[in-house]
Every structure is written in C-alpha cells, then in structure tokens.
Image (cartoon, rainbow, N blue to C red):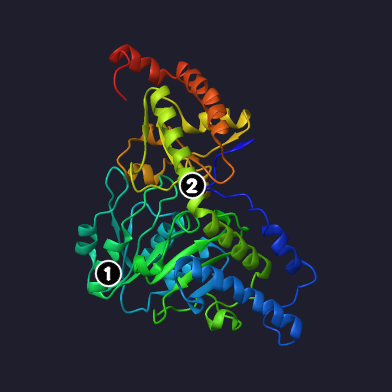
Amino acid sequence: MIYLDNAATTPLRPGVLEAMLPFLSENFFNPSSVYAPARKVRAAVDDARGIVASAIGAKPDEIFFTSGGTESNNWAIKGALNGEKKHIVTTAIEHHAVLFVCKHLEKCGFEVTYLPVDGEGFANPADLEAAIRPDTALVSIILANNEVGTIQPIQQFAEITARHGVTLHTDAVQAVGHFATDVNELEVQMLSISAHKFGGPKGVGALFVKKGTPLFSLLQGGAQERNRRAGTENVAGIIGMGAALSAAIEEMPAEFPRVTALRDRLTREILDKIPHTRLNGARENRLPGNVNISFRFIEGESLLLHLDMQNICASTGSACSSGALEPSHVLMALGLDHEQANGALRFSLGAQNTDEEIDELMKILSPAVKKLRALSPLYDDYLKTSGGAGF
C-alpha cells in the first residue's frame, strides 16, 4: 500500500504505542484520585502537558486536553461568547469544525462574517479590518488549510485583532508537528491541536488558551483540567500525544525539507506529465506535504477509486466531508468552477513516504487519467471544439 492521505490521519509514530500501553494496563488509575499510584499517572499527564506546551511556546497551565480538533474548535468559539457581543468573523475556507459551529450559532441569533479568499486561498487583512465591529466577540482563522495547504499570515491578522481588543483563535490542526508553530510569534489567544495529525492516537487533542483569555467551559461536570474541561482524562491518549509530538519536533529539522522536496517533485511530475491539470492553493507558504491537483474532464471520485484498486490511498478533500455530493467549499471559494472542483485530488505526504512511492504513483496515475478521459464526453467535446489547447 502507498498511503498518501496523511492530512486525514497519520500512522502512529514508532514508540508511541509502547508509551501508551502501560496506561491501558498496570497504570490504569484515575489521575484525579489521591493515592500514590494515581499521583504517578497525574505526573505523567502533566509531563505530556509540558511537552505540548513547549512545542508551541506556551506555558503548561495554558494547555487543556480535549478529545481532538473538533472539540477544541467548538470550545474556542462557543466558549468565547459571553452573550453581549453577537458577532464572529471567520473565513470561507475553514474546516467544517469551525464553519458548522458558526452556521449553528447563526441560528441562535449570532451574526457571522465569512471573509473571502483569493485564488491561492489567502484571506486579506484589509477585509478583516473592515469586518470587525464593536460587537465582534471572536475572530477564528485557520492557520493551515487542510484541503489546499495554504498557510495564512496569522501575525497580520493578530495585529488587527489586538488593536481592536478582539480574541483571535486559530485552527492549527494541520500545522502543529509539521512546521514551527509558536503562539508567541503568532500572537493568538487560542489555538487548536489534534494528535492524530502528527503520528499520535485518535481521540485526543488540546486547546491552547492564553492566560487571561475569557473562556467559558464547554462541558460541565467534574473538576478536571483545572475546572475548565470536565470528564476523566484520556490518559493513554494524552501520553501518546506527548510522545508523538516530542518525536515530531525532534525530527522536524530533517523532515520538513525532505517532505517539502517530495511535495515539489510530485507537483512537478503531475503538472509536467499530465495535461489539463492545475495546482490548487498557494504556490508559496504551503504545507510541506500538501499537493492538491485538479484533473479536468474527469471526476475526482472516479480517479480515487481507480487508485484504490491499485492499493494507493489519497483523497478528494477533507476526510470529514467524505461522501458529500457538493463540491469542496474550499475549492469553490478559491474560484474554481464545479468541474474543476469535482476533478480535484489531494495527495498529502508524511514521514513514511519516499521517492520510490512517487515513482510508483506516477506509473499508475498517468494512464488512469488518460483512461478516464477517454470515457469522458466532456473531454470529447473539448477536443472537438478547442483542439486540446489550454488548461
């Protein structure tokens, strides 16, 4: 199998499962209990909290463990609303864990401004400046887009929100563990993390909340997470998250340029060898492993199934939208038409991918596209009318 869907999830990094197993067996104790074995479990959770904090330049008491990126995004947005200010600003290309929260809040009487993006997926700081109002409670802008890989200039947005005294949250699920992400440089007040995007287990994540940032609890119950997030901690998941992030940070100086080189090579190979293709998203300031390509005159789902039969795993977009009939909201926001959006595939590279896998992919991808286009009435009409010129 060639796995090229690391933006959806990643395999556990070496050593992560081994770090987790004792907390699923002999160290099963509830970290909220007061006896000695439980205190050792509490100490291990606190060690993992310190690892996560250090990885993003935060303080340990600014890290709150959650069930993953979706909960972190929900908590950041809903918890920032105090009932007085009824306006939220976000972008048109957020993950659904942000967009659907905002759509729900609109039904509850809140107003949401969705900033447009340009053809590469960048929001304009001037649009944010114009959108902020006296009743703006929160700005939430994704750091690195999960579909097209565009990395937003968050610092520029932070300068604007700071001037207006508005809280800034960023969904950094695709960023943390893949490139240097420091909350002090970003100047955000909240930041969401998910462990399974950097070689950790599923079902665990974190929310960074800068000290002094007002935030209501999303869950009520026990006193866990310093009375901010009720529910017995997912101890084994938290330990695995710490182990995975520690390894990701250690390997980043070598892995970032290696994966970036693979990304650039795959992009060149596709654009040079397969006609009527285009790269979606930013040319620069892009996630190291993201390659999102539109293949004209064919359905991305058809191409994806063809690759699947050859034991190659890729995606047509966000894994959370798998099975959706509508074209990607991200690609449509970039200005693609329905055909271009429906013909897009995302290849997301990770630690396990190699040049040899790129070679094997291209051997299969090129003839697959040619075969599917031969069956396409759109392609037949195009050849008759244009002679094959243009994208």
Decide which of tag 1 and tag 2 comes sooner along the chain. Answer: 1
Number of other residues with Cα within 10 Å of mark 2, as a class: few under 14, some 14 to 19, many 20 or more: some
Q: Horizontal placement of 162 versus 81: left or right?
A: left
Q: Position of residue 264 (x, y in %)?
A: 42, 37
Quarter of image, res 172: bottom left
Taking the spot 39% from the left edge, 60% from the top edge, the residue there is 103
Q: Is residue 216 above or below residue 303?
A: below
Q: Position of residue 288 (x, y in %)?
A: 44, 46
Q: Position of residue 254 (x, y in %)?
A: 50, 49
Residue 107 visible in the shown view: yes
Q: Is residue 288 above or below residue 191?
A: above
Q: Which amino acid is tagged 1?
A: Thr
Q: Position of residue 114 (x, y in %)?
A: 30, 57
Taking the spot 71% from the left edge, 79% from the top edge, the residue there is 40
Q: Horizontal placement of 176 versus 284: left or right?
A: right
Q: Which amino acid is tagged 2?
A: Ser
Taking the spot 54% from the left edge, 43% from the top edge, the residue there is 5
Spatial CA span between label 1 and label 2: 28 Å
Mark 1 sits on what residue?
A: 161
Residue placed furthest toward the front = 254
Please state which of residues 369 and 364 is positioned toward the viewer in this rendering.
364
Quarter of image, res 148: top left
Taking the spot 37% from the left edge, 24% from the top edge, the residue there is 276
Q: Is residue 33 above or below residue 316?
A: below
Mark 2 sits on what residue?
A: 318
Q: Horizontal placement of 67 versus 103: left or right?
A: right
Image quadrant holding the C terminus, namely: top left
Q: Is residue 347 above or below residue 132?
A: above
Q: Tell how many labels.
A: 2
- Give the secondary structure at mark 1: helix
Residue 289 visible in the shown view: no
Image quadrant holding the N terminus, namely: top right
